[in-house]
Every structure is written in C-alpha cells, then in structure tokens.
Amino acid sequence: AQKVTQAQTEISVVEKEDVTLDCVYETRDTTYYLFWYKQPPSGELVFLIRRNSFDEQNEISGRYSWNFQKSTSSFNFTITASQVVDSAVYFCALRLQTGANNLFFGTGTRLTVIP
Amino acid sequence: SAVISQKPSRDICQRGTSLTIQCQVDSQVTMMFWYRQQPGQSLTLIATANQGSEATYESGFVIDKFPISRPNLTFSTLTVSNMSPEDSSIYLCSVVTSSEISDTQYFGPGTRLTVL
C-alpha cells in the first residue's frame, strides 16, 4: 500500500531561521512521483515541486531546497532564512506510475514563522 | 499550469440541503478531480470527473451523495447532496493539463463549506 508520513504536525521557528520539513513515503512501485504543496491560510493549494523517482538530484529554488533520498524513502524540504510569508501548511504527496491518478497526501506540517 | 476558479468560494448551508460547486479552467485539460479536506485534515480524493461519462469514485464516496458532471474539457461541477455537519470541509478541484502520467496536479482555490 502507498503511504506518505509527515511526522511533524506543527513547527514554529523565528524569522530567519532555517527549517526542514520531513516526508517519508512507502510504495512498492519502482516508478513514482513526489510532490510538495503549500497551503497558506487562504486555503488554496500551491504547487512547489515535482520529483521523479529516477532522479535523485537535490534541487534548490531560491530559499527552498529539497533532498530526495531513495535509500531512506525520504523527500525532505528545507526553507532557508524563513520569512513570515512562509507560514502555511505544507503537504508532501506521492503519485504512482501505474494505476489511478490519485495523489496520496501526507497529513501536512503546519509551519509558523514568528517575526 | 492552468488558471482554475471555483464558485462559490465559501458557503454556509442548512442540514438537508444540497450545494453545487463549479470548477472552471481557462484552458482545456485532460483530467479533472475533486478532493475533500475536512477541518485540520489532509486531502482525500472524492472522484475523477470524466468528460462525457460518469465519474470514477473512490472508496467511501458514492454518486448519490456527490454527483459530478463534466460536460466539456474546461468545466466540472460537484454537488454535495443532503448535507450534514460532517460534510463541512474545503472542496478542491484539481486538473492535469497533459496526458503524461507524471504531470503535476494543479489545484483551484477551494470552496469552504460549513453545514449547520
């Protein structure tokens, strides 16, 4: 069965601190896709990144970086020099190559950045 | 990506009534989905909206409760029927713009529903 675990329910950091959001996934499929989404208080879901299972290169986009490690089935997300606008719920999600198009979501991590 | 709009953005409804939520995309998309997010919870897929045919429902969701239409490649509706307070959730429409299985799902702004 497929599963995405975000063990951190809530995190609070002070502005300018770095923070890492953890994501661990389970699947028996060899080809799959991992995603991160941001949900600010307004409620919309904003796409941040997609990573294919065969591409383990880490990615950096501005203050955001992602560390994908197949050996530990993890896809962690780091925000450097956090800002108040980063306050949101962050979801990690898994989609399989086979079968339906369902996105399996983790339970989300609520990040609060304190000014 | 695509620009996705939903109507209404929020509503407060009485128990036993029904609400239809609209999802409009600014371009033709291959796939449309409806998700539910209960308060403080993650997202759960309700169904895949199929153009010109009946929607494909996930386990635990039935057509009588959540009828879905998709008359064309840019529009879909989800109806929440005979509502109860347990239906209070955010309902989100999402789309895939290409035929690639790896393609990203983009989400609409959501409809925040409160049932009294």
Image (cartoon, rainbow, N blue to C red):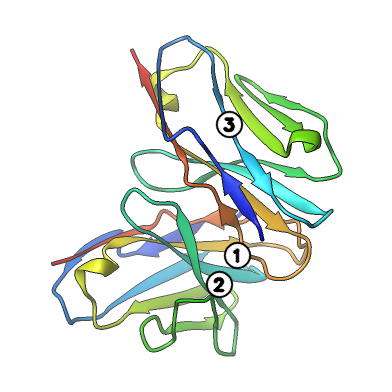
Q: What element carries label 1?
A: loop
Task: Please check whether the numbered discs 1 and 2 fall on a single chain.
Answer: yes
**CA gap, disc 3 and disc 1:** 35 Å
Badge 3: few (under 14), some or many (20 or more) residues near its Cα, within 10 Å? some
Residue hosting label 2: B74
User: In what element is the residue under mark 3?
Assistant: loop
Mark 2 surroundings within 10 Å by alpha-carbon count, few (fewer than 14), some (14 through 19), many (20 or more): some
Decide if residue A97 is on the left or right side of residue B95.
right
Q: Where is residue A73 in the image (x, y as percent from the top left)?
A: 73, 39
The type of residue carrying mark 3 is: Asp
Q: Distance between the residues labelled 1 and 2?
A: 6 Å
Chain for disc number 1: B
Q: Can residue B26 be seen in this view?
A: no
Q: Name the residue under label 1.
A: B27
Q: Is residue A9 visible?
A: yes
Q: Is residue A100 above or below residue A43?
A: below
Q: What chain letter is assigned to the residue under label 3?
A: A
Report the front residue among B76 and A102: A102
**Whether label 1 touches label 2, CB < 8 Å:** yes
- Residue type highlighted by circle 2: Thr
**In this view, the mark in front (3 or 1):** 3
The residue at the point 67 percent across, 62 percent down is: B97
Q: Are marks 2 and 3 in contact (CB under 8 Å)?
A: no
Where's the C terminus of chain B, which quadrant?
bottom left
Q: Residue at x 59, y 90 (%)?
A: B53
Badge number at residue A22: 3
